[in-house]
Image (spheres, helix red, strand yellow):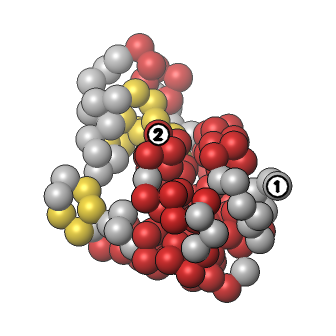
């Protein structure tokens, strides 16, 4: 499978676009649609130099597609049950945000690979915390991912 336009738009909406370097909620230097420049806050590191002038939305989308390829690879290799396009897109969005390591060790994956598709939306909704606090942006994103998983 491959990330669809609907899946790409789900990630874009969840991440939001910032043309200049910013510190994400995890305090990592990022740009565009959540592209990780380096771990830790903006500090003038050499890895920030290519992004000093910012990025266009087109460049941000190119970075997103590169980064999403890792999430796609993880979903393709870790999920052992058949998926619809909407389920695949939802999981790629979640993995893009949370990382393949979290997918690999998650109860979400265990439940899904056991064939319990109906429990996946509730599992997605467990991932709404940042720094121990419920984040409204993550609640919105997980709700959208849950709906896409359930309805497509």
Residue pointed to by mark 1: 1
Out of 106 and 50, give the one closest to the viewer. Answer: 106
Q: Secondary structure at mark 2?
A: helix
Between 96 and 113, which is closer to the camera in this rendering?
A: 113
Residue at far bottom of view: 151
Q: Secondary structure at mark 1?
A: loop
Instruction: Give percent across and percent down for residue 58.
Output: 69, 47
- Residue at 52%, 72% in the rendered image: 120
Quadrant where the N terminus sits is: bottom right
Whether 106 is drawn above or below 89: the answer is above
Residue 64 in view here: no
Which residue appears at 59% of the width and 64% of the height?
114
Q: Residues within 10 Å of mark 2 (few under 14, many from 20)?
A: few
* 11 vs 30: above or below: below
Asked whether the beta carbons under mark 1 and mark 2 sit within 8 Å of each other, the answer is: no
Taking the spot 61% from the left edge, 60% from the top edge, the residue there is 113
Find disc 2 in the rendering and name its residue. 101
Across and down, in percent, residue 121 comes to: 50, 76
The quarter of the rendered structure image containing the C terminus is bottom right
List x then y, in percent, for residue 80.
69, 54
Furthest-left residue in this view: 132
Return the x and y of residue 97 as percentages of the image width and height: 47, 52
């Amino acid at each position: 499978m491959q990330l669809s336009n609907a899946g790409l738009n789900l990630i874009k909406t969840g991440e939001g676009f910032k043309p200049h370097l910013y510190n994400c909620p995890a305090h990592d230097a990022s740009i565009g649609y959540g592209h990780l420049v380096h771990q830790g806050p903006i500090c003038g590191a050499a890895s920030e130099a290519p992004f000093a002038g910012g990025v266009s939305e087109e460049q941000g989308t190119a970075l997103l597609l590169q980064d999403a390829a890792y999430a796609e690879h993880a979903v393709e290799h870790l999920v052992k049950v058949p998926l619809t396009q909407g389920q695949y897109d939802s999981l790629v969005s979640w993995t893009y945000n949370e990382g393949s390591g979290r997918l690999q060790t998650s109860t979400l994956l265990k439940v899904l690979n056991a064939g319990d598709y109906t429990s996946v939306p509730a599992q997605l909704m467990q991932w709404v915390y940042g720094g121990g606090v419920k984040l409204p942006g993550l609640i919105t994103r997980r709700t959208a991912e849950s709906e896409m998983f359930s309805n497509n």
